[in-house]
Amino acid sequence: QSVFGTIFVLEASVDLETSIRPISQVKSQAAEMLRHVNETRAPIIITQRGEAKGVLVDPRSYQEMVDALGILKLISQSERSIELDEVTPHEELMTALRRRLDTASDDPG
């Protein structure tokens, strides 16, 4: 946990003995599997004809993954901007923002 909140937590690992289930078992035991992933936060890999075809995860874990990917995308975009020298020095940015805020506060509209 940082001052920015939890960024990414890897709480659940995949236990290959219990976390891989055939689609036929998912069809017959869906409610139990949903209970399991929500209680343990351990994903279940769903197979069809012996091949992994999907993963059942709890909503909190899924949201954490989406959030983490969003942060990684922002970092990647920032690194690319730095490589292309598409950056604004901090002081220049702050001056421009102050100017915009001053202009906005002077506008009665």
Image: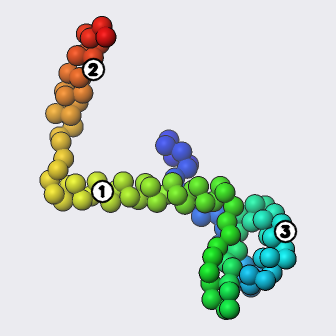
* Residue assigned mark 2: 101
Quarter of image, res 29: bottom right
Q: Are marks 2 and 3 in contact (CB under 8 Å)?
A: no
Q: Say whether residue 61 is left or right of residue 82.
A: right
* Residue assigned mark 1: 77
Element assignment for label 2: helix
Choose mark 1 or mark 3, whichever is in front.
Answer: 3
The amino acid sitting under disc 1 is Gln
Image height of 66 relative to 104, above or below:
below
Mark before the other along the chain sequence, 1 or 2:
1
Q: Position of residue 108 (x, y in %)?
A: 30, 7
Mark before the other along the chain sequence, 2 or 3:
3
- Between residues 46 and 60, which one lies in front from this camera angle? 46
How dense is the environment of label 2, judged by Cα within 10 Å: few (below 14), some, or many (20 and up)?
few
For the C terminus, the quadrant is top left
Q: Say whether residue 109 is left or right of residue 68.
A: left
Element assignment for label 3: helix
Alpha carbon distance from label 1 to label 3: 41 Å
Image height of 13 relative to 106, above or below:
below
Q: Position of residue 83 (x, y in %)?
A: 18, 59
Q: Are marks 1 and 3 in contact (CB under 8 Å)?
A: no
- Between residues 49 and 63, which one lies in front from this camera angle? 49
The amino acid sitting under disc 3 is Glu
Quarter of image, res 71: bottom left
* Residue assigned mark 3: 32
